[in-house]
Image (cartoon, rainbow, N blue to C red):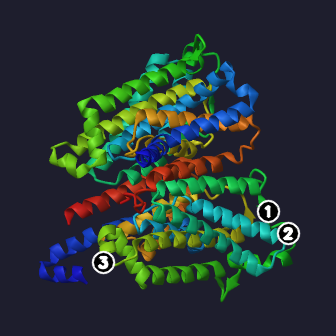
Amino acid sequence: MLSTKTAAGGSSSSGLKQWLIQNSVILGMIAVLIVFGIINPKFAAPKNLSNVLYQSSLLIIMAIGMMMAMSVKAVDLSIAYVADAAGLLAAMMVIRSWPSAAVFLLPVVFGVFIGLCNCLFVSYLGLSAIIATLGQMLIIRSFELMLTNSAEAQILFMLPPNQTKTFFYLGTGKLFGMPFLTIFTVLVIIAAYFIRHRTVLGREMDAVNGNARVALLSGVNVRKVFGAAFILGSVFSSISGIALVSRTGSAVPTSVEGYLMDCFVSVYLGAIISKNNRMTVIGTAIGALFTRLVSNWITIMGLGAAHKDIINGAIILAALSIGALKKQHE
Amino acid sequence: MNKNSTKLNKAFWEDLILRRGTMIGMIAIILFLGLRAPSFFRVKNLMDVLKQSCILILVAMGQTVVLVSGGFDMSAGSLLQLTANLAAGFILAGMKTPSVLIAGIAVGLAVGLVNTFFVVMVKIPAFVATLAMMLVLSGVTTWYNKGKSITLSNEPGFFFLGQGYIGPIPVLFIITVAVMLLLHVFLKKTKTGLRMYSVGENYAAAMLHGISKKKALLISFMLGGALIGAAGVLQASYSYGASTMSTTLDFLLQALAASLLGTTFSRTEELSVIGTAISALFISSLSSALIANGVSNLLQPGLLGLILVVSVMLTVIKKREIGQVTIF
């Protein structure tokens, strides 16, 4: 709204320039994808794109969890491990043929529990978020290793189909010809959008992000809001952990570790394409999708892990540089 | 009179626990574990433990130097991995030990310079800028060693750095202590060092005194980079080359934990090189002591996490602010 007003006020060329500057990052992202498609047409094939869309749903959900913590000026380093452990718990319960309700609910309860611990540490006891969630991450890692007798993989796809049918529906089932996982992800994004942007809690998170002291003086229960962000984060990441195991059919302890970096990339990209560098749900989802598209292209081109790391790092630096320069420009 | 003295007594104990609690706890834990495993306190084993912990101490000190002026270095672990690989490769290519050491330090300085550029000139928060640098560096490492470990053998001159002994004392430990003392004097006794502290602790006040944050951060990142670059070379010498095992994140987290644990030694939560070094030594020897006690190594990360959380909590619990960090 504001940008169209200023655009109408100035001459048309400066309005265009303003618009270009404001949307430079997302235009850049589209340009990068187009170039990728030209270099390798296989990348732009509809089948590949829909496949990436299906695969990126897990990163989207997990990155939204990370975004919750980051939108109150905090980080949650334990987020990938919460997903890992939640998936592992679900897998172990399926192997022991527990009822489906327990398989889907108990890992989320585990996520709530870890979120509550983080909340207690950072919000009520005053530990820095980095230290508390780092400690939490190490504790969960030990918990997983003990549980699986030093990282034995829990394989589900070898089990008889009727034992795993309900559980696999989340990750591999189809509804109205669409993968159920994609529909589920859209529902999660909508839910997250309402929590983050349409509730009092979401608004209070913005206030704490802007200036915690001012928020306190204006009557926001800062400790509660700050802690709630961590609980939300853990819940979203435990959901993504269950979905991941349901899709791949096996749970390998500590294998989700790499998602942590991808979460950071997604959230930062998402913030930069949003107005005023705010942490938004939609931005994060787009960021996660872009991250997955890039790594998919790297795989198609047959480039190794080395290139993936370098390109990811370069993307963060480029995006943040543009974001920082944009801020100085304003 | 009597009442007064009990009050004083109470204050004394409170002070003792708050100020020295962490150190007492650390010594108690190591003593307890060490006495249970009889071979732990033999001189030879102790020297091994010291030698083992030196690389972590060096990296943790590099991290501390950056934290002192308000920076943050996520790239520490992957820089270590990179220079270890480079050093191993250079030695195989026939370079002499001093030039390899210089090359390692030069790479560290260059990385520090790039970090400073993004943090100071482009104004990206240190946490993210160095996070991106971490990804880039680990990519470069994989690209350099092509996913294979580089093994060295029969390089007596180079191995002396990481594995040699002077009398009963490991050379590596002597280097580490010397570096620690130099850094301590630099940070606490020179004008530049104290200015770096002031920028990190209270930027507004430092600015009013005309202290440049840019300069402080530049020195921090360069010094930290050089230190970690050198540590990578020593690591290659200590472990007969460079492995491809992705321990970079673990190393970074342990170094970070050591720096933060070190702050619990002072009542004002001030970072100090000596506190960091002691904490890093503790973290390293804890795992050796646990192994000597037959505790499963699956439990170790959890115990480390627990100790980190509890000991830092003891110092911050009085203030009880919320744990926000600068991320953007």
Q: Amino acid at mark 3?
A: Ser
Answer yes or no: are tags 3 and 1 on the same subunit. yes
Report the residue that reaches farthest toward the front: B1
Quadrant in the rendering for residue B300:
top right
Q: Are marks 3 and 2 on the same chain?
A: yes
Task: Specify few, some or many for label 1: CA neighbours under 10 Å numbering under 14, 14-19, or 20 or more.
Answer: some
- Mark count: 3
What label does residue A221 carry, if any?
Answer: none
- Across and down, in percent, residue A90 comes to 73, 70
Look at mark 3 in the image and give the residue it sits on: A218
Q: Residue A279 location in percent, x, y?
A: 40, 70
Mark 1 to mark 2 CA distance (whole Å): 8 Å
Write down the residue under mark 2: A159
* Left or right, B108 with reference to B95: left
The disc, 3 or 2, on the residue closer to the chain's N-terminal end is 2
- In the shown orientation, is residue A103 left or right of residue B266? right
Camera-nearest residue between A251 and A37: A251
Q: CA distance from mark 3 to mark 2?
A: 56 Å
> What is the three-letter code of the residue carrying label 1?
Ile
Q: Are marks 1 and 2 in contact (CB under 8 Å)?
A: yes
Whether A257 is drawn above or below B136: the answer is below
Q: Nearer the viewer, residue B208 or A296?
A: B208
Kindly identify which numbered label has been placed on residue A155.
1
- Can residue A290 be seen here? The reply is no
Nearer to us: label 3 or label 1: 3
Is residue A268 found left or right of B163 in the rendered image?
left
Q: Which residue, as the protein is rendered here, is positioned at the far top?
A: B167
Question: Residue B323: x and y, percent?
Answer: 43, 60
Rendered residue at 59%/14% (across/down)? B165
